[in-house]
Amino acid sequence: MTSTTESASSTPTSPETARPSGTAVVVGGNRTPFAKAGGHFAGASNLDMLTTTIDGLVARLGLAGERIGEVRAGAVLNHSKDFNLAREAVLGTALAPETPAVTLQRACATSIEAAWDLANKITLGQISSGIAGGADSTSDAPIVVSDRLRRTLIKLNRAKTVPDRLRLVGQLRPADLAPVAPNVNEPRTGLSMGEHQALTNLRWKVTREAQDAVALASHTQLAAAWDEGLFDDLVTPYRGLTRDAALRPDTTIEALAKLRTVFGNDHADATMTAGNSTPLSDGAAAVLLASPEWAAAHGLPALARVVDAEAAAVDFTRGTEGLLMGGAYAVPRLLARQGLTLDDIDLVEIHEAFAGVVEATLAAWADETFAADEVGAPALGTLDRSKLNVAGSSLAAGHPFAATGARIVATLATLLHRRKAALVAEGGSAEVPVRGVISVCAAGGQAVAMLLEA
């Protein structure tokens, strides 16, 4: 197999740059602020947001004209016109047009899956750099039409005569013209993610109080991270929005407790509200990965190494497992393979699709019976909450589905890099790793976990 070398499109790179190093590192990230559905980004498409985000990353890292090894990106709510989304985004940026691109999708884990794929290719020496990304707009969701209207429109496009076209149009009935409302309900159950999570909360006895506490921490910690400048190098303002629109720095536990429940209302003591569930959001995120040699040659930092990753899926259709509980399996298996426990992890990122996901996942990690009977890996024990989502997460930032993984990978790598630098500045050993683990749940009962190390 021949390894490729990326460089400025007209400038050959030395053989040393192309040699496989067996290591992939996170170099930097960029995202839009995340907007509420129907808000600031209502007029932007997935392609608009993804192109802008990648271009912002390219500008920030000085990569204009560069041929990157590969761009892997996707969206969950796709228009058919965006069948080649990633490549079209590349062509709209300052990257060299010779940069190849792949469009992929693993629901809410799309861009962390993309980062994982690129890390593997970099580790194998097949490429030296890559950009993983995702974009989603719930404001610009594709509208599905009825089967009869869709088939008729296809036939109309092929019809050669006016009488043929009139005959086809005459076959339509008024009901055929009604659009099918867009939704992301699970096709095999018909339940929304919120309705699934309500069932999971019942199984794991997740309380309203615990969920509201997770939500409050998310807002408080995301606001602090913005104020401390964490996102100065991770976010580019877009369409007049400079911070995440869902962020409520002044919210309180009392205010959260007053919200009415929106999911699980057919069960006794419903607990899920708009405050402890992620809002429908618009936005995009991208993260650059590379070999350490490529990063050094470009004068860019190696924020954190991608150590390992794991995907999991659960049988939520026939079994009793919760739709969004894949992380309860992926993380224990990942850490067991690496010979690590939660005590070896400095920071933990659990995607807050709902606050209940965080609470149920933590309960499952600590449950020795669940670990032995279901996961097949040692129980992780009780997490020190001071390690959890220290810069906030999806409840406060928002959750444009495919963008979430890249947001978290870039944020966690930056946090680990800063923590490592602080420890060394205080006299600590540069040889002591600082580790973080990510868990991103996804539709279809899936999840992707990733281990980073600075």
Image (tube, rainbow, N blue to C red):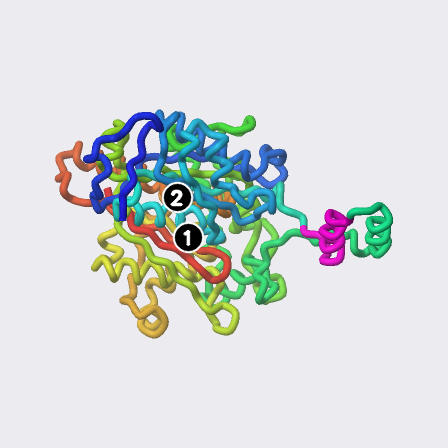
Identify the residue at image location x=31%, y=59%.
Answer: 382
Residue 337 belongs to the span the image colors magenta: no
Q: Residues within 10 Å of mark 1 (few under 14, many from 20)?
A: many
C-alpha distance separating marks 1 and 2 = 9 Å
Q: Residue farthest to the front?
A: 160
Q: Can residue 375 be seen from the camera position used here?
A: yes
**Residue 154 painted magenta:** yes
Q: Which residue is mark 2?
A: 408
Q: Residue at x 36, y 35 (%)?
A: 68
Q: Is residue 319 above or below residue 280?
A: below
Tell whether 417 sits left or right of 177: left
Amino acid carrying label 1: it is Val
Residue toward you, 8 or 272: 8
Give x and y (percent) for residue 254.
52, 46
Q: Residue at x 34, y 45 (%)?
A: 118
* Magenta-drawn stretch, dominant element (helix, strand or loop): helix
- The numbered dot on residue 440 is 1
| Residue 229 in view (yes/no) | no
Q: Is residue 275 above or below residue 311?
A: above
Q: Position of residue 146 (x, y in %)?
A: 73, 56
Q: Which residue type does callout 2 highlight? A: Ile
Element carrying mark 1:
strand
Residue 88 located left or right of residue 61:
right
